[in-house]
Amino acid sequence: MTGRLVVRRLVIAGACLVVILAVVGVVRVAAVLRADAAPLVAAPVSADQIATDVQAESARASDLSGALTTLESQTTDLHDALTAAGDQLTADAETAAHLRSDLAAAKARLVTLQAQLAAAQARLARLDAAKAAGAAPVAAAGAAGGGEHESGDDD
């Protein structure tokens, strides 16, 4: 039985080898048929065309480099302008704060002046009332009280 087993294995190995060779042959025939069926549509690019394309790309690269230099200059100008605007904004904020404090002081002076005006109007009303009642009581009040005198505190 050993002999039959060896022969059987040799037959199987030979059959496998025939199948592998057949597959390789079929692939080669298919490649040849495909190459014949697909003709080259575009001709290969010539060396002159490649040189022309290289020169064109070099010119384009040079143009882009110039554009980048211009863009860098504009970016620097924009940065400087933004910095100046930020500085101006800071100065404006400080000025606004100073003006707010000046406004608060002016409002306080206005309140004081309005109070002084109200007091002066009240004095004037009293003087007018006294004048209407008669000139004698006003003169007597002026002599007895030493007269009304403004202190000169008005700003």
Image (cartoon, grey):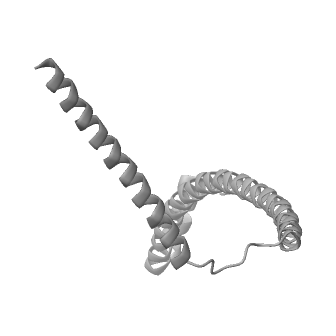
* Left or right: residue 58 compared with residue 19: right
Q: Residue at x 63, y 57 (%)?
A: 96
Q: Is residue 100 above or below residue 44?
A: above
Q: Residue at x 49, y 64 (%)?
A: 31
**Where does the image place residue 21, in percent across and percent down from the top left?**
39, 49
Closer-to-camera residue (148/1): 1
Tell me if I can see residue 25 in this picture: yes
Q: Residue at x 81, y 61 (%)?
A: 68
Q: Is residue 95 above or below residue 48?
A: above
Q: Is residue 42 above or below residue 137?
A: below
**Where does the image place residue 147, in percent across and percent down from the top left?**
59, 58
* Left or right: residue 8 compared with residue 13: left
The residue sitting at the top extreme is: 2
Closer-to-camera residue (104/77): 77
In which quarter of the view is residue 8 placed?
Answer: top left
* Left or right: residue 62 compared with residue 131: right
**Where does the image place residue 113, in percent across and percent down from the top left?**
56, 61
Query: Which image quarter is the C terminus in?
Result: bottom right
Q: Residue at x 37, y 53 (%)?
A: 22
The residue sitting at the left extreme is: 1
Closer-to-camera residue (16/94): 16
Query: Which image quarter is the N terminus in?
Result: top left
Tell me if I can see residue 149 in this picture: no
Q: How many discs mark residues in the rendered view?
A: 0
**Where does the image place residue 111, in percent across and percent down from the top left?**
51, 59
Closer-to-camera residue (79/151): 79
